[in-house]
Image (cartoon, rainbow, N blue to C red):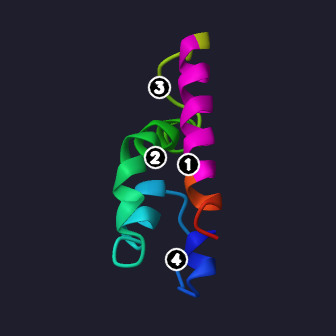
Amino acid sequence: ALLVFHERTFPKVHDLLDLSTRLLDLETEVAKIHEDLVILNRYYIETRYPGDYPEFIWSDAEEALASAQKVKEFVLSRI
C-alpha cells in the first residue's frame, strides 16, 4: 500500500522484506517494523507450498496477529 501511495512501481513479489527495502528511501522508519515483517514472512513464504515446515502453535498465531496489527498501524499512519 505504501509503494502505491508513493506512486512507486514494484515487482509481483510477496516477500515483505523485499517490498520494505523498496520503501527505505521514502519511509526510513519502515526499519522499525522490520522484525514484524520477518515474522509475517514466515507464514506466507514458508507455507506457500507443501513441504517441511514447523507446526505452528497458538502462541505463533498471537505473535503473528500482533505483528500484523503493528504493520497495519504503521501503514495507516502514513497514508
Residue projecting furthest to the top = 58
- Disc 3 to disc 4: CB gap under 8 Å: no
Q: Position of residue 23 (x, y in %)?
A: 42, 72
- State which quadrant residue 67 falls in: top right
User: Which amino acid type corresponds to the residue marked 2 in the rendered image?
Assistant: Leu
Residue in front for this viewpoint, 21 or 14: 21
Distance of mark 4 from mark 1, alpha carbons? 20 Å
Q: Are marks 2 and 4 in contact (CB under 8 Å)?
A: no
Q: Work out whether mark 2 precedes mark 3 in sequence or the reverse, and give the earlier one.
A: 2
> Tag count in the figure?
4
Q: Secondary structure at mark 1?
A: helix
Query: SS at mark 4?
Result: loop
Dominant SS of magenta comes to helix
Image quarter in which the C terminus is found? bottom right
Which residue is labeled 3 in the image? Answer: 52
**Which mark sits nearer the N-terminus, 3 or 4?**
4
Q: Is residue 27 above or below residue 57?
A: below
- Kind of residue indicated by mark 1: Val
Q: Residue under circle 4?
A: 11
Within-10-Å neighbours for mark 1: few <14, some 14–19, many 20+? some
Q: Which is in the foreground here, disc 3 or disc 1?
A: 1
The kind of residue on which mark 4 rests is: Pro
Q: Secondary structure at mark 3?
A: loop
The N terminus sits in image quarter: bottom right
- In space, the residues marked 2 and 3 are separated at their CA atoms by 21 Å
Q: Amino acid at mark 3?
A: Asp
Q: Name the residue tied to disc 1.
A: 71
Q: Is residue 67 magenta?
A: yes
Q: Which residues are magenta?
A: 59-73
Residue 37 location, x and y as percent?
46, 46
